[in-house]
Structures are given as structure tokens and as C-alpha cells.
């Protein structure tokens, strides 16, 4: 199973970005193979609107089944739900710390958006 | 003739110029308040005979029984208003610009269009001025369709003044496009000049004839004048930084009514614009 984490860095020690839609990058971690790749999300960083929806499309294409991030807005939540991607809100400092929290069952699956949308 | 009043920078005096210019028209003139996020031309006019019309845009509605999850609708949408994840589409009406593309490309005719109200157009009259005001509903982020609706109510061959929103983005383009002349209102300050130069780039890109009006003369320096000289842009009028203008403005009284001295200047402005337009 693959899981995405929002980040601004390129490795497991990088900071966990608290934003979902406007995260600069996604680290895609393969829990079985214990390998990862980093995908770019820069275009959404500067999007006027719809960053959450487009970011959901972006990670859905990479085949992940879950996302760990700081916060997730209402449009992103609806899109991720439709894509069948589970959302986990974490306050971890780094990607590694967030993965540890996930592995040890400290993260609960989000049942709703935890922040308001930016414009609507 | 349709004259658009734009600025780049906000607060330079677009409304003041638009309303006063409309007032000095010899005959009937239409005044289109295209600053639909904060229309305020009506504050300076004693209007009567209001009529209202709700304006909406078509947003998609999906019949899931007919949908085969092909994803064509999502492919054509540039605004992520309709997305698919190999599933039936998810619609985000607030993202939709109402282009109708998804309805057209759907092979199974699963998409129909539903009206989403975005604002209202108010039509009223004040002397020689017929005022058409666009008011965007609070929370709606789509000004251009409402601005186009304001413009669509203007009959062809009637003189019109269009009070554009500030800035140089889509709402302004929607307001000034197809006008016969653009009057750029600025102030003699670094901010005024910076945004004026952006506005000049915009009207040149749109290939529209234009000129500049410098408001609050004496409050800044001469950099706007230097810019206009260098760029060969005509300065059609200068309004001094006059306390009396501001006092009357704050009471909602028009400059040309309170201070008749300025009436002639606005009449000259109109003449200059007409001449420039004739010369092409």
C-alpha cells in the first residue's frame, strides 16, 4: 500500500507541510517495499482556486490509498473521498515522525474537513 | 460611443469621473457600473424607477444513471469544477465558470445545466442618466459573467460610460473589452504610476484607443506626466487635489453640480475623447 505525505522537502527527514492543497510536494511512501518517491505540486501552490481538488487528482494518479497531512479543506475532502483516499491529520514535525505515528496507530482517519475553504 | 473608465490602482477616482462625465452628456446616456464587487455609482445619483433582474450562470448537474464514468467532462474543465476519479463526476458549482463544455462533450447526455444565481442587475434612472448596476452576491468569486450581463443590457448605438473595477485582471478585461475608448484614471504618486503602467500594457494588448486623466494634481510629483510624455500618451484632463471636491464627494454630491466650474472641464474631456476616437 502507498501513502502520500505533504512536504516541502525531498526525503524522509523533511518537514511535514501542514497544507494539503498548497503543499509544494508529495512524498509517496510504499509501506510494503519501504521505498519512496517525491512528486511535484508546485502548480497548485500558486493556483488561485481549486488547489485542493487538483492536489487530490495529483495524488490519485500516483495510486495512493491514504494521505497524511496537517489540514484538509472541504473541497479537497470531498475529492479525496470520491477518489477513495483516506485522510489522516497529523501534527508531526517531519515525514518520518508522521509515518511512525501512522504505523503505531496514533493517527485517526478524518471524518470531515478540519479547516474552512479559503474563498467559498 | 462606449467609453470605459479604468485605472489599475483602486481609489484613483473612476467612479467620480464616470458619474460626472455621464452628467455632462447632452442627451441620454447609459452608465454601466461594472465594479460589481463594490458598485457605488448609485450613491451619487438620485435614482428612481428601479427594476431588478437576477443573473445566473449554467452549472452542470449529473444524472448518475446515464453516466458511464468516461471522464470526458473532467478533461475539458479548466477549473476543476467537475472531476472524476474513475467514478461518476464530482461537481464543485462554486468553481464553475459556466462555459457549458462538459455538457457538450458528454457522450451519454448525462449532464444537464442548472442555473446558479451569481448576482443581480438593477436598472434605474436619474435625469439624463440611465444607471445599470451589477451587484455580485456576497461569497461569489465570479465577476466577469455578471459584468458581461451588465454590458449585454446596453442597447447598441446609445452612448454609454462603463465604470470598470480596479486592477488589470479578468473583471477589468470583461468591462473594457469592445469599448470605443478607455480613459485611465490615475494619481501622480509612485503607486498611481506603477498601476497605470500595468493598465497601459493591458489596453495596448487589447488594442483599444486610450488616454489618461490625472486626479489629485498637486498631491504627488510629476512622474506620471513624465511617463505619459515618454510613452506618447495624451493626458486629457487634470483634476486638482481640491478639498472642496472631497467634501462634496463625502456628501454624495457630484463635482459638476456642486462646483459648476468643473462642468466645462468635463465637457472638454468628452470633446477630446470624441475627437481622439474620430482620428482613430
Image (cartoon, helix red, strand yellow):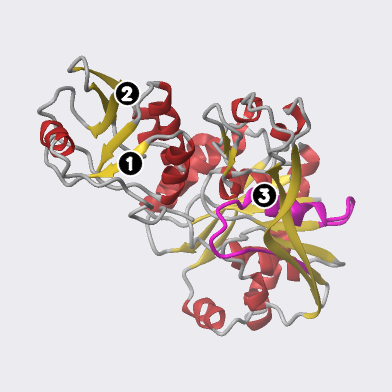
Region of the chain picked out in magenta, as a range: B131-159
Q: In this rendered view, identify the residue nearer to me: B155 or B144.
A: B144
Q: Where B114 falls versus B121 (above or below)?
A: above
Q: Is residue B113 left or right of residue B136?
A: right
Dot 1 surroundings within 10 Å: few (below 14), some, or many (20 or more)?
A: many
At 42% from the left edge and 43% from the top edge, which residue is drawn? A76
Does B55 sit above or below residue B94? below
Please name which of the two marks, 2 or 3, marks the residue nearer to the observer. Answer: 2
Question: Along the line of sight, which residue is nearer the eye, B173 or A29?
Answer: A29
- Identify the residue at horizontal 42%, vertical 38% (top origin): A80
- Residue B262 % position (x, y): 64, 72
Name the residue at 20% across, 44% down: A107
- Marks 2 and 3 belong to one chain: no
The quarter of the displayed image where residue B169 is located:
top right
Quick one: B69 or B117, which is closer to the camera?
B69
Image spot of residue B27 (x, y percent): 87, 67
* Residue, disc 3: B175
Q: Which chain hosts label 1?
A: A
Which residue, given by chain and number where applicable, does mark 2 sit on?
Answer: A40
Amino acid at each position: 500500500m502507498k501513502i502520500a505525505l505533504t512536504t516541502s522537502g525531498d526525503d524522509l527527514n523533511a518537514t511535514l507541510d501542514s497544507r494539503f492543497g498548497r503543499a509544494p510536494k508529495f512524498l509517496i511512501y510504499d509501506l510494503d517495499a519501504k521505498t519512496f518517491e517525491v512528486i511535484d505540486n508546485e502548480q497548485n501552490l500558486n493556483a488561485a482556486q481549486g488547489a485542493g481538488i487538483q492536489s487530490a487528482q495529483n495524488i490519485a494518479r500516483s495510486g495512493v490509498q491514504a494521505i497524511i497531512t496537517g489540514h484538509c479543506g472541504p473541497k479537497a475532502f470531498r475529492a479525496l473521498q470520491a477518489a477513495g483516499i483516506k485522510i489522516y491529520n497529523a501534527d508531526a514535525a517531519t515525514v518520518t515522525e508522521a509515518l511512525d505515528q501512522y504505523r503505531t496507530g496514533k493517527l485517526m482517519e478524518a471524518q470531515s474537513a478540519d479547516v474552512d475553504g479559503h474563498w467559498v | 460611443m462606449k467609453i470605459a473608465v479604468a485605472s489599475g490602482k483602486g481609489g484613483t477616482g473612476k467612479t467620480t469621473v464616470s458619474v460626472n462625465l455621464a452628467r455632462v452628456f447632452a442627451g441620454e446616456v447609459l452608465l454601466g457600473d461594472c465594479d460589481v464587487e463594490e458598485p457605488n455609482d448609485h450613491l451619487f445619483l438620485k435614482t428612481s424607477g428601479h427594476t431588478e433582474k437576477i443573473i445566473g450562470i449554467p452549472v452542470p448537474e449529473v444524472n448518475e444513471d446515464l453516466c458511464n464514468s468516461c471522464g470526458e467532462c473532467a478533461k475539458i474543465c479548466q477549473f476543476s469544477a467537475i472531476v472524476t476519479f474513475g467514478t461518476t463526476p464530482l461537481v464543485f458549482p462554486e468553481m464553475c465558470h459556466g462555459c457549458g463544455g462538459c455538457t457538450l462533450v458528454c457522450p451519454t447526455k448525462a449532464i444537464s445545466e442548472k442555473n446558479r444565481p451569481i448576482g443581480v442587475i438593477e436598472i434605474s434612472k436619474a435625469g439624463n442618466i440611465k444607471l445599470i448596476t451589477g451587484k455580485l452576491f456576497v461569497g461569489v468569486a465570479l465577476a466577469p459573467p455578471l459584468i458581461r450581463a451588465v454590458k449585454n443590457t446596453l442597447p447598441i448605438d446609445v452612448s454609454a460610460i462603463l465604470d470598470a473595477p480596479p486592477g488589470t485582471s479578468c473583471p477589468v478585461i470583461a468591462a473594457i473589452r469592445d469599448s470605443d475608448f478607455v480613459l485611465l484614471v490615475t494619481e501622480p504618486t509612485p503607486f498611481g504610476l506603477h498601476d497605470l503602467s500595468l493598465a497601459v500594457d493591458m489596453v495596448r494588448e487589447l488594442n483599444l484607443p486610450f488616454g489618461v486623466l490625472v486626479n489629485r494634481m498637486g498631491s504627488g510629483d510629476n512622474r506620471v506626466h513624465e511617463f505619459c510624455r515618454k510613452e506618447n500618451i495624451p493626458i486629457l484632463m487634470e483634476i486638482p487635489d481640491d478639498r472642496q471636491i472631497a467634501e462634496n464627494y463625502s456628501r454624495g454630491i457630484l463635482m459638476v453640480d456642486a462646483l459648476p466650474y468643473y462642468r466645462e472641464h468635463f465637457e472638454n474631456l468628452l470633446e477630446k475623447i470624441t475627437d481622439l476616437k474620430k482620428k482613430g
